[in-house]
Amino acid sequence: MKLYIVADMEGVAGVVDSEQTMGASAYFEAAKLQYAREVRSVCEAALNAGVEEVYVNDFHGNGLNINPEILPRSVLVIRGGFRPTSGYDMLDETFSGLVLLGAHARTGTSNAVLPHTYTGRVTYEIFGQPVGEFDILALLAGEMKVPTILISGDSTAVEQAGTNMPSAHRVVTKYAVNNGGALCIHPDLVCEALREEVTRAVKNIAAIEPAQIAGPTQLSVKIADVNLAPRIEWIPGAKRVANNCFEFTCKNMREVANLVYGTATLVECRF
Ligand SMILES: [Zn+2]
């Protein structure tokens, strides 16, 4: 049995501010350590529960947040900065489950810790329903028949995840207080909860349905800064439906994921 973990930092215990997720500060160093502890907890519990192979995608910032020495020796880590996918590098049908660790809510969410969807400058919808990074990844994995077995993050992110992955196990790491803070659970308790919940999830894996959308998928891309609209118009198939809103029809989730990540990258690009 193979398990794939996408690890992000905004949703780990104690993280409430961007000072903790980037730059050169003692806050960032402490957050990276907790991020690694949470990833280690999931890896160890999964291996103990019978998982044979674990891949960890260090999908935050420059992808160099985890010192692999802290992890069990059999774990493989995908590291490094810009990669061509939105977090699913090397994910395929051979995996039995996906874990979304340290997730954050979608762009524009109120009462959420550091909400964004690859960027804070775009909001995305599939068939009119808002989607975030965790939705895209869960639906993409689902297209490969890989169920999302566990999601962890702040209370709002975990609640949002109920839309597309109602049967995924959940670990809440903190309760958002407006958008600038959170009521935080002790980091040790979060690690313990992750161990317990991933053990349950692995045992229950056959009963967890993959998240799925069938057939052509309508993606809408709404940009915060209308001056960036010409960049979206560069993309073949873009249909402008409002000053700041575009629609695409995608043949599958891989196309959706690539368009989401591509448009986020385009609007973030500085010339
Ligand atoms: Zn992140």
Image (cartoon, helix red, strand yellow):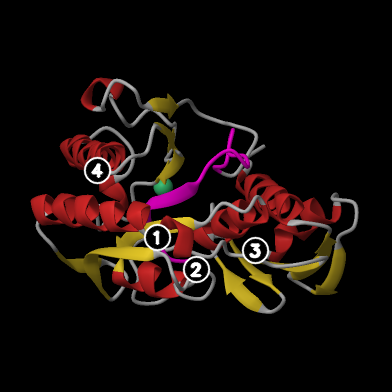
Q: Secondary structure at mark 4?
A: helix
Q: Which residues are magenta?
A: 87-107
Which mark is first along the chain, 4 or 2? 4
| Residue, disc 1 | 104
| Quadrant hosting residue 181 | bottom left
Residue 248, visible in the rendered structure = yes
Give neighbour class at mark 4: few <14, some 14-19, many 20+ (Cα, 10 Å): many
Give neighbour class at mark 2: few <14, some 14-19, many 20+ (Cα, 10 Å): many
**265 sits to left or right of 251:** left
Amino acid type for the residue under numbered disc 3: Asp
| Residue, disc 3 | 225
Q: CA distance from mark 1 to mark 4?
A: 23 Å
Q: Is mark 2 within 8 Å of ligand 1?
A: no
Front disc: 3 or 1: 1
**148 sits to left or right of 246:** left
Q: Nearer the viewer, residue 36 or 115?
A: 36
| Quadrant hosting residue 103 | bottom left
Residue 240 belongs to the span the image colors magenta: no
Q: CA distance from mark 3 to mark 1?
A: 22 Å
Which mark is first along the chain, 3 or 4? 4
Amino acid type for the residue under numbered disc 4: Ala
Q: Is mark 1 within 8 Å of ligand 1?
A: yes
Q: Mark 2 and 4 residues: CB-CB less than 8 Å, in contact? A: no
Q: Secondary structure at mark 1?
A: loop
Q: CA distance from mark 2 to mark 1?
A: 15 Å
Number of labelled discs?
A: 4
Residue 165 is tagged as: 2
Amino acid type for the residue under numbered disc 2: Met
